[in-house]
Image (cartoon, coloured by chain):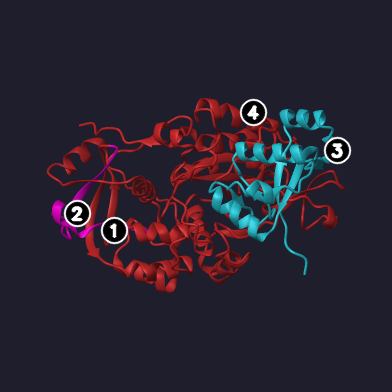
Amino acid sequence: MAEEKYPINIWINEERYQKLQEAGLADMCEEMLAGLKVLRVYANEEQKDKILKVFPTAKFDASTTKSIELLPREVKDKIFDKIVEKRSVDILDEFLADY
Amino acid sequence: MAEIGHGGKEIVERILSPGEAAEKIKGLTQVPIRAQIANEVIGLAYGFFCPLEGFMGKADVDSVCKNMRLANGAVWSIPILFDLSEAEISDYGIKEGDSIVLTYQGNPMALFEVEEIFEYDKKEMCQATFGTTEERHPGCARTYEYKDKFLGGKITLLTEPKINPPFDPYFLPPLKMRKAIKEKGWERTVVHQTRNVPHTGHEWLMKGAWLQTYGELPIEKPLVGVIVNAIIGAKRKGDYIDEAIILTHDELRKAGYFGDHNHLTSLTFWDMRYAGPKEAIFHAALRTNLGITHHMYGRDHAGVGDYYGTYEAHHLLASVKDDLKITPVYSMNWLYCPHCGEVTSEGLCNHRDEWQKFSGTLIRSIVMDGVKPPRLIFRPEVFDLVMECAEKYGFGSPFVTDEYLEKRTPVFTIPPLSA
């Protein structure tokens, strides 16, 4: 059975979009919910548990979206910066290594 | 004509006139209460909790835990308790048969006729109410925090609470709400229970429930109203602030997504227990007392974590349907379908692989990221008002912060007794 993956949605505001454009990464965005741009970083079960433990305000939306939500904006900014630096959304191991 | 509430009992407001109150409390012991108890005093005195007239005695608690009924047979699912420690009872010198004055914010709030002082096993109460004894369940945690003795007896308000702006227009206790419904000419009403700022999924839940409730009624004039009943009580950091919740719901009416002819926003003071199915039963009693005829129930109503099955509340409601005077309206989720290009019901749309589900939590994340959601998902008037509330009431944030908890204007205040 394929391992369950849980997205963290990095919603793209103007500031983030500008950074993506400057890095030539604007086409990494997906479009969701009638026009919102988003980068989706996927966590496995172990990473999800660690995120919920390290960032107590975060919440796993188990009933509707199956996504990890309510991470503080500064945490998401760090995840976003790591994506831009690595030019990939596969950065969670490296990001979580600091915690 | 008598207004009959849950359990077939007439709703009577238990409130003394100012002169009578000052006379009644002379020489009585004063006991300060916390916010949860003050909320419940209001619930009891105005008839939100009819047929209860006061905090429960042991026979009622035992019957609620064992049979989900009060000792008189009326369906009831959550114990309503007044707790004190043995030392406090001794220090205040409280005995069965005494009357005491409950004070809140330093002022006399209610007269409490203490009929009974008793103990009850908290684990048993948790198992019966929440289906678990685990401390991580917020309802259990609240129960374990109760002190070890419970006092039962009737409650009478000494003075009406002053509901502070911007909440004042939305406090419609049972008798007032029933009058408002009659004035609207609504033959049926359907209630939306909320603790959230509405996104369009919520809006369509309400609109769907309105259609379900309308049924076979004639359509020449508006006969059905949606009543938003926001639960105002204990807040957790990260929740939307209360001001944003109540004002944005009303904004759906003001901005024309609903209208005066079919929408009314109101509030009830209650600290959520997250008791899932048992809380659903409690909500049915509460809204019956408000004179509402239909009640929306979605999936995992008032649940938390994975403690309850998706439809457990619906099944429990069905088991006592003959004892309830309110009709459940079951609601399917609404979601965004990019193929349809609209918000649609999961019971209607079949582009399942394309569905994009959204929740209040997801919308909060979008707002926290500094992004304005599209109008199909979150109405621009609602978003703008959320931001306005952040500045006006939330110390810069639409979400509850330590600063908000410390400095906010209370939803209600208890004024000093006038002689």
Where is residue B164, by image quadrant? top left
Residue B414 % position (x, y)? 32, 36
Chain to which mark 3 belongs: A
Per the image, is B81 magenta?
yes
Chain to which mark 4 belongs: B
Q: Name the residue under label 3.
A: A27
Residues at circles 1 and 2 in contact by the CB criterion of under 8 Å? yes
Front tag of 4 and 1: 1
Region in magenta: B80-105
Q: In which quarter of the image is the C terminus of chain B?
A: top left
Q: What's the residue type where badge 2 is placed?
A: Glu
Q: What's the residue type where badge 3 is placed?
A: Asp
Q: Can residue B51 be seen in this view?
A: no
Q: Mark 4 points at which residue?
A: B384
Question: Which residue appears at 69% of the width and 58% of the height?
Answer: A44
Query: Which chain comes out red in the rendered image?
Result: B
Q: Can residue B230 be seen in this view?
A: yes
Q: Which of marks 2 and 4 is nearer the N terminus?
A: 2
